[in-house]
Image: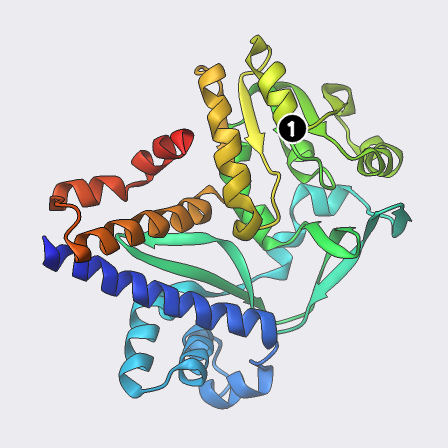
Amino acid sequence: MKDKIAEIKERSDKNGKVLFFVASYLNNCPTLVTKEIIEEITNGEKAGEERAFASFLANVFSESDSEVSWLEREYLFKGVKRLSTEEYLKNEYFKNIKIPRIKEKNWEFGYQSYKPYEGFIYRDIQVDGYTEIPQIGYFDKEFSFPTVYENGQEWMAIKPNEIETMKEPIENAKGNVLVFGLGIGYFTYMVSQKQDVISVCVVERDESAISLFEKHILPQFPNKHKIRIVRADAFEYAKNEMANGMFDYGFVDLWHDVSDGVDLYVKMKKYEALCPNLHLDYWIERSIISSIRWSVFRGIYEKSKSGSISISEHEVEKYLTDSYLKSFVKFI
C-alpha cells in the first residue's frame, strides 16, 4: 500500500510542479513565445509548430534535461494547441451579439485581445489517471473578445476557455433552465437558442450588471422572450426556490476561477439534496474537483506516513475518484 501512495504522491508532485510552471508563464510572461522563435525552431513549417511551442516552454522552465523530457512527454506535448481565430469567430454569440464599451457603477463592458502566440488556458484541465494536464492554447494572429469587468478586474470574457468549458453544459440544457450568474449572457444566449429549451431563469444579485445587460445586450437576443432575470443571492434562491419543481436543468457559474470556486462549489453542492431530480452542472468542475482531490490526498498521505491510519489501495483509489469527491463535498 505504501508503494501505491508513494506512486500517487510522485504524480501529485509532478502535477504541482507543472501547474507552478504554467502559472508562472501565464501570469508573468504569456507573450514569451513569439512568431520569430517558432519559425526559427521549425524553419517555418506549421506542422511542427505545437511541439516547438511546447519544447520551448519546457526548456525555459525546466532545471535539467530529464525534467525537460518528462515535462514534454507527459504534459506539454499533450496540452499545447494552436487554435483558429476563424473557428471561434463562427460562434453564434460572436457573430450576432455586439458588446458596447460602457460602464455603470462597478461594472464595465469592453474588449481585450490575445496577441499572436500569446499563451492562455483554453479549456478545463484534462485528466489521465492521476496525471492532470493544463490545456495551453495560442493563436497565430491577434484575437479580440468581449469582456465584463467588475471593479476593474476581469469577471467574465467570451474567449476560448469560456466557449470550450461551456460546450457540455450547453448540450445538457433542456426544458426549463436555471442559471446562477449572468456575466454578459453567453450561456444564456446559447441555451435560449436551443429548441428543446423552454425557458431560462437567470439569478444575478448585482443590480448594475442586470441593468447593463437588459439595456444593451438582451434586446439583441432573438429568443429574449424565453429569458427571465431574477435579482437575488444565488444561495438564498437555491435554498428557497430551486426545489419548487419549476426547473429541469441548472448551471452554476458563480466564480472567477478555482481559487474562489472551491468554497462556492462546496456551498452550492449542499443544496442538491433539496432537488434530487434536477440535473446541475458546474463551470470548470473538473478543475475544482482536482483541487479538492489533492487536498484529500494530502490528508491521506500525512496520516499514512505517520501511521495513524491503515488504508487499502482500493480505498485510496476510491476516495480520489470524481464520483466519490462530488458526493463527499456535500458533507464537508
The x, y position of residue 17, in whole percent, is 38, 70
Q: Residue at x 17, y 48 (%)?
A: 308
For residue 86, which quarter of the picture?
bottom right
Query: Can residue 268 be seen in the rendering of this structure?
Result: yes
Establish if 237 lies above or below 43. Answer: above
Establish if 136 lies above or below 103. Answer: below
The x, y position of residue 176, in whole percent, is 60, 17
Establish if 82 lies above or below 292. Answer: below
Q: Residue at x 14, y 55 (%)?
A: 4
For residue 194, which quarter of the picture?
top right
Asked if residue 189 lies left or right of residue 264, the reply is right
Q: Residue at x 31, y 80 (%)?
A: 67
Q: Secondary structure at mark 1?
A: helix
Q: Residue at x 82, y 36 (%)?
A: 213
**Who is closer to the viewer here, 300 or 19?**
300
**Who is closer to the viewer here, 7 or 212?**
7
Asked if residue 212 lies left or right of residue 16, the reply is right
What residue sits right under mark 1 in the picture? 234
The x, y position of residue 190, in whole percent, is 64, 34
Protein image colouring: rainbow
